[in-house]
Image: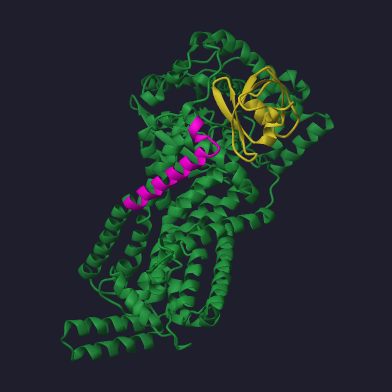
Amino acid sequence: MAETTLSQKTLTSRIALVGNPNVGKSTIFNYLTGLNQKIGNYPGVTVDKKTGSVQINGESFEILDLPGTHSLFPNSEDEIIAHRVLNHTQLETRPDHVLMVIDSSQLSRGLFLASQLIDLGVNLAIILNMADLALKNNIDIKSYELFRALGVPILSTDARNQKGLEEVKNLISQRNFSKAPNFIDIQQVVPVEMLAQVKERFALENHYQAYQMIRFGTRDKAVSAENRAWLENLAQSADFDLEEAQLEETKIRYKKITEIVTKALTKKTEPKPKSNLDKVFLHPILGYAVFLGILLLIFQTIFTWASYPMDLIDGLFADISGWASSALPDGPLTRLLSEGVIPGVGGVVIFIPQIALLFGFLAILEDTGYMSRVVFLMDRWMRPFGLHGKSIVPLVSGVACAIPGVMAARNISNWKEKMITILITPLMSCSARLPVYIILIGLTVPDEVVLGFINLQALALLGLYLLGIVGVFGTAFVLKFILKTSEKSFLLSELPPYRIPRWGDVGITMFEKSKTFVMEAGKVILAISIVLWVLASYGPPATMDQIRQEGEARLENVSDEEQIALIEAETSSLLLENSFIGIMGRAIEPAIRPLGYDWKIGIALITSFAAREVFVSTMATIYSIGGDLEDELTIREKLAQQINANTGEKTFNLATSFSLMVFYAFAMQCMSTVAVVKRETKGWKWPLIQTLYMSVLAYVGALITYQILS
Amino acid sequence: MTADTLPLNKSGKILEILPSPLKINLMELGFLPGKKITLQHLAPSGGPMAFRMDETLLALRKSEAALIRVEQI
């Protein structure tokens, strides 16, 4: 077995796809690999490792899609990965060939990276993409001149319009890559003796690889500590200024590139005027209005569109679980399946419509070039809170669902800004809080209109959303002083020309993001649902048996169907009260009494750790409502009659209800979010810290609310 | 003068990039001596600025634009 995989590995050529950000690299990757994509992880970083395979003329090739980078100088996590793979310090991903994509209208910037790749000595071929855009800008590239100057094969494509892509396949299958002569002589910047020493010690192929090692090896954790110390020592003893060398290298490269570009490129010289769209989208006032309008439109669409598939999934899993419990022989295993596993899987799958739609919209906004405009507009308002302009995307997503929001935070390169964004996004009021809010507001806030047009219930709901936003920015502001980083925050981004979105790529993004969520978060969610099910279904055997027997005894003399349903509901309510979760609910009662809750609400708090919306169904079980859970009114009526045994007052009075809503606004009651935060931060540390402070926030907030209102 | 003080819709020729940890990032993007940049958009209240350079529109924070020494043309 081991032998076959080894021989397969040596047979399949691995091709790394490299390029600046926004050059259409992913369109080419998607074209080549289709849905044959795999998303994995590079050790120690949050960058996705995207690989895919393609069959050309019966031969299989592995394509590695490297994150977009401007140079081989690693500035962000993304660029570190590109740097490592291409410098071969990440050995298991060492590519055989490198295919570089250049945006034809950004020739100089692309050639900068290309020239570095040439000096590294990789087997290279270049794709000049976006030929259509270059043509629109009256740019004409003589690719033969380029080929002569660089010495590597060059192809022209227009990936958006599917032009020239067959040739890319041919190029790959013929392995039409070549090692070109050095572009610049790195000895101009670094003493040759130093290069020779490093080259020998690390068994490198050429001087440029040695230079990369001298410059960045000391910061690369893939290099052993001993070697890092040695490198540090080398630069120090030679009294050599590495940063100055890097600037010098950049100057020399650009000088030569400018010469080449002057020869190879003809263009109209008049400067491009402002685009009409930017006059509106980047307008100091109109720009924000348009952004708000687009947000409203997206949410409106998500709430209306996602609700259909979500209802469908909900019903489907209820049916499957009903079928399982009736078709399989009764027993603990069947119940685990029908009450634990199937609803658990359903609880994962139910998020897919929202995640897919949200990522679809984000992909469209990104692909059209609009998203970078939003970052431009919002950066100023995010920075006082330790956030980046890019943080707006996760926060906005958080209103629908925190999961895609947390996943979107990886686009932020600065560690501190990314962490704050991930830590605060779940405080936005997501759609799962809505059912809880609606029931509790319905219970306590009169459906009245004040001041002629303000509905009190709507006002209460708005207040809860605002509370979430205050929580988000308040927490961010505190975290800004706690988290430390030496990385400098910068914006420095391109505002790309507006384009029609590539629908195929949007579809693939939706599919891949949903798949990642199901695969990665699904495992954790499933595990926790099973634990919660066991805790809710089992209790001290003696008590549980007694309750069951009493229930059966009461049923014996009853024939009226309504009576039977009532007794069954009361029995299951008693069972839940005496289960392990019930015992836990009673155990935490002293802690939650100051918030105005009794132990029954305590049970709901524990079960809704899995997901907030479970609150409603748990309440229904505890108060033995039975029958149709969908009927919100029955739940509301039942809840309205409950009397708190501690106070003798109504359980769901104004103070308790608002205290509960504040609790739900702040508490981390969503294991999917916990699982995704764990995935994005590569460990349990941050999700645990996050759960802890959100719980503290929820507790204190609820305590204050109850004490003021009661 | 530095690029952050360019008036809106005016152009400047880059003279040098001032020393800073971001110098290399700016040069990588093509901010090089001799290049012409035009300030096309300003976000309100001291927010980012967008410069047109050749075919690209590039967004910079004010503090980043202050690293680019220009002469107005």
State the residue lying farthest toward the left.
A559
Query: Which part of the image, by quadrant, shows the N terminus of chain B?
Result: top right
- For the residue pair A231 and A567, the one nearer the viewer reads as A567
A640 displayed left or right of A631: right
Q: Is residue A224 above or below residue A118?
A: below
The residue stretch that appears in magenta: A279-304
Give the colouring mode of the picture. Answer: by chain
Q: Is residue A469 magenta?
A: no
Looking at the image, can residue A287 be seen? yes
Q: x, y (%) of residue A286? A: 50, 38
- According to the rendering, which colour does chain B have? yellow
Q: Is residue A18 above or below residue A318?
A: above
Q: Does the magenta stretch include residue A299?
A: yes
Residue drawn 72% across the image and 39% down it:
A228
A300 displayed left or right of A240: left
Looking at the image, can residue A46 be seen? no
Write down the quadrant of residue A7 in the picture.
top left
- According to the rendering, which colour does chain A have? green
Considering the whole magenta stretch, tell me its main secondary structure. Answer: helix
Residue drawn 66% across the image and 26% down it:
B27
Q: Is residue A402 above or below residue A95?
A: below
Q: In this view, does A243 lie above or below A526?
A: above
A186 displayed left or right of A349: right
